[in-house]
Amino acid sequence: MKQFGSKKSSLNRYMLVPLVMIIIALVLDVVIFTIDIKAGVILAIGVVVFVVLVAISYFVLRKEVIEEIADLSAGHDVIQEKVLRELPIPYVLMEQSGHIFWSNSAFIRMVGKDGAKKGKIMDIFPEFGKKILDKEVDRDEKYIQLLGKVDKRTKEQEVFNYRVELRRVHLNNQGEENLEEKTEEEIKRIKDENTMIAMYFFDETQISQYKEEVDDQKLVAGLIYIDNYEEVLESADEVKHSLLLTLVDRRINKLLSNVDAIVKKIEKDKYIFFFQQKYLPKLKATKFSILDDVKSINVGNEMAMTLSIALAVNCNSYVKAYETASQMMDLALGRGGDQAIIKDGENVSYYGGKSQVVEKNTRVKARVKAHALREIMETKETIFVMGHKIPDTDAIGSAIGIYRMAKTLQKNVHIVLDKESMSVRQLLAKVREDKEYESDMFVTSERALNLADDRDCMLVVVDVNRPSYMECEELLKKLHSVVVIDHHRRMKDSIKSATLSYIEPYASSSCELVAEILQYVATKPKLRPVEADAMYSGILIDTNNFVVQTGVRTFEAAAFLRRSGADVTRVRKIFRDSMENYQIRARAVSDSELFEHEYAIGTLNGNGLDSPSIIGAQVANQLLNIEGIKASFVLTEVNDTIYVSARSIDEINVQVIMEKLGGGGHMTVAGAQLKDMDLYRAKEKIKNLLLNMKREGDL
C-alpha cells in the first residue's frame, strides 16, 4: 500500500506539468491580447480547449492509469522475487546479527535442508564469527569451505570452495527523521533495523582445483653440496674413498627417487635436481632426515660428512629458480652448512643446522679475502669501520684491527661508535689514553654521515651481517663500497649488496678472522700492544676463555696476537668488574628456574643498570656451569624490550631456537629481542617454544 501511494504521488507530480503550461499560456495570451486583440482571442480559445482536454485526461483516465501502474509494479515485484529465488547463485539476506530472514533456492540446495533450518549464518559457516561485516565498510569478500559427502570408494570427503561477496543494504530511512532527539542506543537500534547484509556465494571449487593442478606441476629447483668433502676424505683411508662417496650418492638418490626427481652430479661434491611441486610436502614431512643419514655413514672416516640443501619454490622462470637456489645455497653455507633451506616467494624455511660447524683447515680463503680487501682499500681515501649496536669487545677489537690495516695503507679511518657498553669502557679508555691516536678515531653516526662521500669512502662492517643490528644503518645505505667480516650465521635479511663478504660461522670471533687477514696482507701491518690487547680480548670473551667455539685456528690467531704484544695480565685487568654488578649476577643465578630438568631460565630487570644486556649474557654463561644444564636462557628487561641471551655447551643448538624468535647467532651462543611484552609473558613464550620444539623433534 505504501508503494502504491508512492506511485500515486508520482502521478500527481507528473500531472502538474500541464497546469504549469496552462499558466504560462494565459500569461502569454494577456501579453498578445494587448498587442493584437484577434490573435489574443484565438490563443485564448486554444488555451480553453487544452484545459478541457487535460481535465478529461486527469479525471477520466486517472484511475485506469493508476491501476495499470499498480499492476505493473506488483508484477515487477513478483518477477523480481521469482528471479532472485531461482537465481543459480546462492543468495541470502540477513540482519546485522547474522539472523537469516530470506534465502533463495540455490542457497538451500548448497547448505541442504538441515543447514537451511539453522537461524544464523555463523551456525552454518563458523568462519564468519560474530562480526560478519565490518561496520566501517559496505563491501567485503571472504573465502570459505563447505564439506560435502564422503566418497564410499575412496573414503574422501568432498570440499567445496566458495568466494563470498558481502554487501551492506540500507533500507528507507523510516524512523530516522529526528535522530538528534534520540539517545545513542536508540540511534544504533534504528540504524540496525534499517540495514541488511546481502551475501552472494560463488562456487570456485573447480577454479581452485585448476590452480592446485598448476601449482603442483610447477618446477622446484634444488642444489645439494657436500660441506666438508676434502676434510672427510683426508680423515679416511684412500681405499675407502670410493665406498664413502658411493654410499653418499646412494642416500641422495634414494631420497630424490621418492619425489620423482631428476638428479645430476655436476661436480665431485655438488648435485642439482628438479621435481614437481606436488612432492614438496612429502619431502618436508621427512624434515630432511638425509642430513642425519649422511652423517651416520662411517667407513673408517674420523669426520662425519655433512650436506647443505637449497630449494627454490614458486619462481617465475626456470632460470630464476636456479638463481634463487644458488642464493639459498650461499645462505646455507654462510650459516655453517649441515642444513636445508627452502625459499617460497619471500618466505624462507630452515631445517637441520643442529651440528657444530666444521672448522676449515685451509687458509686459502683467508688469503684471498685479505688480498681483495687490500685492493679495495687502496682505491678509497677514507674508510669507516662499524660494528653492531651496543658493541662488545669482539666488535671493538676487530674494528681496531681493521683500523690498523687501513692506517698502514695511509688512509683516513673512523670507527663509528655511538654508545659505549660496560664491557668495552675500560678497553676504550686505554686506547684514548694513547696520544698517538687521532681525536676522530671514534666518531658518532651523525658525524660519520656528514663525513661520508660515496665516491672516496668505503665501509667495513665487523661482527654483524644484519643491517637492522648495525650501529648506523643509514651509513650502509649511503656507501656502495661495503665489506662484511663476521662469524655469525647468515640470516635471510643479511647484507646483500656487499662488495666483499667474509662470513665464516666456524670462526670463534670476528677478531680471529681479522687476525688471519692481517697475517696475509702484503704490507704486514704491525699491531701496537693496546691493539693486540683489544683483539685478544675479543677472542677471549667470545670463546668464554677458550672453551666455546674454539678450534686450531683460534689458538693460532691468539698466538699471533701474543707475538704482536698482547699481554694476558693487562687483558685480565680490563675484564675486572664492580662489586655491584657481581652481586647482581649472583642474585640472577640464584633466582633462575630449572625447566624440564635440563634448561635454566633466568630473568633480570635491567632498568637503571649499566649495560644490562651484557650482564644478562654473563649470567647465561655462568648458568652453564651447573651440572645437568644443557642450555641457559636469561631474559633482561630494558624499557619496552626483552633481551634474550641463550647459551649451550654442545647438545642444544640455541641458534635455531633464537631464530624462531627473530634472532640468531651461533649453535652455542645466540640471542633475540622481544617487544611489547613483560618478563612473565616472555618467560612463558620461551617455555612454550622449548616444549613445542622438543615435541616436534627439533631439539
Image (cartoon, grey):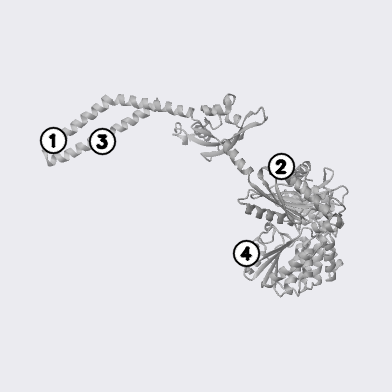
Amino acid at pointer 3: Val
| Along the viewing direction, whichever of 520 and 613 lies nearer the viewer | 520
Where disc 3 sits, the SS reads helix
Where disc 2 sits, the SS reads helix
Q: Position of residue 14 (x, y in %)?
A: 31, 33
For residue 335, say whether it is visible: no
User: Quarter of the image holding residue 72?
Assistant: top left
Looking at the image, tell me whether mark 4 or mark 1 is earlier in sequence order: 1
Q: Which residue is mark 4?
A: 478
Q: Position of residue 113 (x, y in %)?
A: 57, 24
Residue 41 is labelled as 1
Looking at the image, tell me whether mark 3 or mark 1 is earlier in sequence order: 3
Q: Which residue is mark 2?
A: 282
Mark 3 closeness class: few <14, some 14–19, many ≥20 residues within 10 Å: few
For residue 639, say whether it is visible: yes
Mark 4 closeness class: few <14, some 14–19, many ≥20 residues within 10 Å: some
> Height in image: 350 above or below 463?
above
